[in-house]
Image: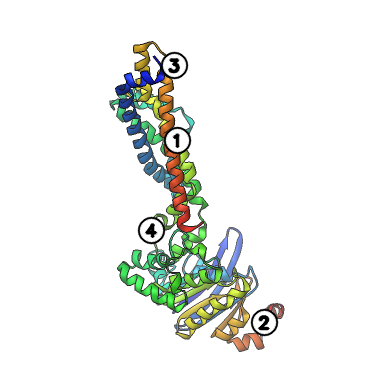
C-alpha cells in the first residue's frame, strides 16, 4: 500500500486527529497568549512578591520537560483529588507551558519600547493601564511578532505529546494506523506531512500579517 | 499657578536638584537656561511628576501635587508636555495621536475630539498631514504635531523640554514660530531650551540654573545684558 492509498483508506483517522491537534494548538496559542501577557506583566510589577511569582512560573515551566508537566497535571493531580479529562490536561499543559515562553517574549518586547512613549502617554494624563494597553503593548507585540510566530509553531508541534495520555490527536491516530497495518513508517510520514502543512501555512500567514502591520506605519 | 518649594531630586547618590524655589504666574512664559547637567530638564520633569521629587513641595493651582494622596493623572491633564524626542506614537496616525488622550482620558466623543484636532492641525500648519504616520514626517513636523497633541487636552500650562534640540537647524524656526504664537495667545509656558535668541524674544522671565540650583533670574534684558552671577556671565559668554 503506498502512502496515498494509506492516507485515503484511513482518512477518517487522520481527519479526526487533525481536529484534535488543531483544537489543542488553538487553545494553547490563544490562552497561552493571554496568560503569557499577564505573566510578563507580573514579572515587571512594582511589587516584589508578584515579580517573584512570575519568575517562579517562568523558570519552572521552562526548566522542566513538558511531558513531565503533562503527567503531573493528568496523573499526578489525581492523587490530590483533581481530575481532568485528557483533553483538559492537554489544553492546560500547552497553555501554561507556552505562557512561560510567551511571557519572556512579551517582556523583551515591552522593555524594548522606548521609554519616551510611556512618558508621553502619561504626560497626557493617561493611567498606567491605558498607557500599557494603547501605547506600549501594541508596539511591543509588533516588534516581537516573529518570535511569537515561532512559539505558535512550537505549540502545534509539541501538542503531539498529548497522545501519551490518550488524546486522539494526529500522533495518536498514526500509532493507531500502524497497529492496524503493521506499517511503522508510512503513517508517520503522513502525519509529518500534515504537521508540516499546518506549521508552514501558519508561518506564511504570520508573515503576511507582519507585512500588513509594517506597511501600516512604515517603521 | 505653580509654586515650587525647596525641590530636591537625587538619583542614588547623585544630587541633581538641590533646593529649587520658584513661583510661576498664570500667563507667564518662563525660560530655563543653563549648561547641560545643570538639572533644568529634571526640574521640568518634576513639575508633572515624570520624575518623583526626593523632597520638597510642588503646588499647582493651589493643590499640592507632591502629596501622596493626590491623583497626578488629573493634574497631568492640565499640564501639556513637549519632549526633545517628540515621542509621537508611531503606530497611530497624526489624527489618532492627537485625539487619543481627549477620547480615552477626558471621555470626549470622537467627533468632538477630531474637530479640536483639526483646528489644532490648522494652527500648527499641518492640516494636510492628518492621515500620515509619524515616520512620514520631518522632525519639525513631528514636533509641531507633538505640540498639537499636548494642546488637544486643553492644558492650563505647557512644559517644553528642549523642544528644538533634536531638530535639523532649518526646522528649528517652524517649531519656535508655533511656540511664539502660543505665548502670544496667553498660554502659561515653562521652556527649557538652548535657543537664546528665542528665550530673549519670547520669555517673560529667564531662569539660569547651574549645579541643581537657580543661580539667577530676571527679565531677558536683565539676565542677558547685565548678568550679575559670575556663572551666568561665564555661561552666556560661551553660548552667545
Q: Are marks 3 and 2 on the same chain?
A: no
Residue B68's place in the image compared with A4, above or below, is below
SS for dot 4: helix
Comes first in the chain, label 4 or label 3: 4
Which label number is shown at residue A130? 4
Which label number is shown at residue A185? 3
Comes first in the chain, label 1 or label 4: 4
The percent position of residue A50, horizontal first and vertical second, equals 42, 45
Which circle, 4 or 2, is nearer the viewer?
A: 4
Q: How many residues crowd around disc 1 within 10 Å: few (fewer than 14), some, or many (20 or more)? A: few
Q: How many residues crowd around disc 4 within 10 Å: few (fewer than 14), some, or many (20 or more)? A: some
SS for dot 1: helix
The percent position of residue A182, horizontal first and vertical second, equals 38, 10
Distance CA(mark 4)–CA(mark 3): 54 Å
Contact, mark 1 vs mark 3 (Cβ under 8 Å): no
Distance CA(mark 3)–CA(mark 2): 89 Å
Q: Which residue is mark 2?
A: B229
Which label number is shown at residue A124? none
SS for dot 2: loop
Q: Quadrant of residue B117?
A: bottom left
Q: Which residue is mark 1?
A: A200
The residue located at (37%, 44%) in the rendering is A34
Amino acid at each position: 500500500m503506498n502512502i496515498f492509498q494509506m492516507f485515503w483508506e484511513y482518512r477518517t483517522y487522520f481527519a479526526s486527529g487533525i481536529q484534535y491537534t488543531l483544537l489543542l494548538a488553538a487553545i494553547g496559542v490563544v490562552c497561552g497568549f493571554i496568560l503569557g501577557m499577564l505573566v510578563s506583566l507580573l514579572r515587571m510589577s512594582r511589587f516584589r512578591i508578584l515579580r517573584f511569582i512570575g519568575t517562579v512560573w517562568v523558570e519552572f515551566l521552562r526548566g522542566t520537560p513538558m511531558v513531565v508537566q503533562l503527567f503531573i497535571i493528568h496523573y499526578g493531580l489525581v492523587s490530590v483529588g483533581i481530575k481532568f479529562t485528557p483533553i483538559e490536561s492537554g489544553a492546560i499543559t500547552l497553555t501554561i507551558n507556552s505562557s512561560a515562553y510567551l511571557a519572556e517574549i512579551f517582556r523583551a518586547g515591552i522593555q524594548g519600547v522606548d521609554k519616551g512613549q510611556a512618558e508621553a502617554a502619561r504626560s497626557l494624563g493617561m493611567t498606567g493601564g491605558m498607557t500599557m494597553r494603547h501605547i506600549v503593548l501594541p508596539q511591543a507585540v509588533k516588534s516581537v511578532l516573529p518570535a511569537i510566530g515561532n512559539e505558535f509553531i512550537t505549540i502545534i508541534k509539541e501538542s503531539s505529546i498529548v497522545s501519551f495520555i490518550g488524546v486522539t490527536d494526529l500522533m495518536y491516530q498514526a500509532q493507531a494506523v500502524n497497529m492496524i497495518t503493521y506499517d511503522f513508517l508510512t503513517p508517520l510520514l503522513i502525519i509529518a506531512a500534515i504537521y508540516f502543512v499546518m506549521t508552514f501555512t501558519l508561518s506564511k500567514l504570520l508573515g503576511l500579517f507582519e507585512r500588513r502591520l509594517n506597511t501600516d506605519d512604515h517603521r | 499657578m505653580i509654586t515650587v518649594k525647596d525641590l530636591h531630586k537625587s538619583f542614588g547618590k547623585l544630587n541633581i536638584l538641590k533646593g529649587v524655589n520658584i513661583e510661576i504666574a498664570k500667563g507667564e512664559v518662563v525660560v530655563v537656561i543653563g549648561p547641560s547637567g545643570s538639572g533644568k530638564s529634571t526640574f521640568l520633569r518634576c513639575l508633572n511628576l515624570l520624575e518623583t521629587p526626593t523632597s520638597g513641595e510642588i503646588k499647582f493651582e493651589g493643590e499640592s501635587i507632591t502629596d501622596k494622596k493626590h491623583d497626578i493623572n488629573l493634574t497631568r491633564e492640565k499640564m501639556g508636555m513637549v519632549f526633545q524626542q517628540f515621542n509621537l506614537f508611531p503606530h497611530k496616525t497624526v489624527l489618532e495621536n492627537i485625539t487619543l488622550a481627549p477620547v480615552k482620558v477626558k471621555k470626549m466623543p470622537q467627533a468632538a475630539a477630531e474637530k479640536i484636532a483639526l483646528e489644532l492641525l490648522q494652527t500648527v500648519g499641518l492640516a494636510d498631514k492628518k492621515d500620515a504616520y509619524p515616520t512620514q514626517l520631518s522632525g519639525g513636523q513631528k514636533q509641531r504635531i507633538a505640540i498639537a497633541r499636548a494642546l488637544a487636552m486643553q492644558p492650563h500650562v505647557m512644559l517644553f523640554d528642549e523642544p528644538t534640540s533634536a531638530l535639523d537647524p532649518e526646522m528649528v524656526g517652524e517649531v519656535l514660530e508655533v511656540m511664539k504664537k502660543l505665548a502670544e495667545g496667553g498660554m502659561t509656558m515653562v521652556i527649557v531650551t538652548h535657543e537664546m535668541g528665542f528665550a530673549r524674544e519670547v520669555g517673560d522671565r529667564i531662569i539660569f540654573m547651574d549645579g541643581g540650583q537657580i543661580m539667577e533670574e530676571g527679565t531677558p534684558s536683565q539676565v542677558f545684558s547685565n548678568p550679575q552671577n559670575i556663572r551666568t556671565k561665564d555661561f552666556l559668554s560661551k553660548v552667545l
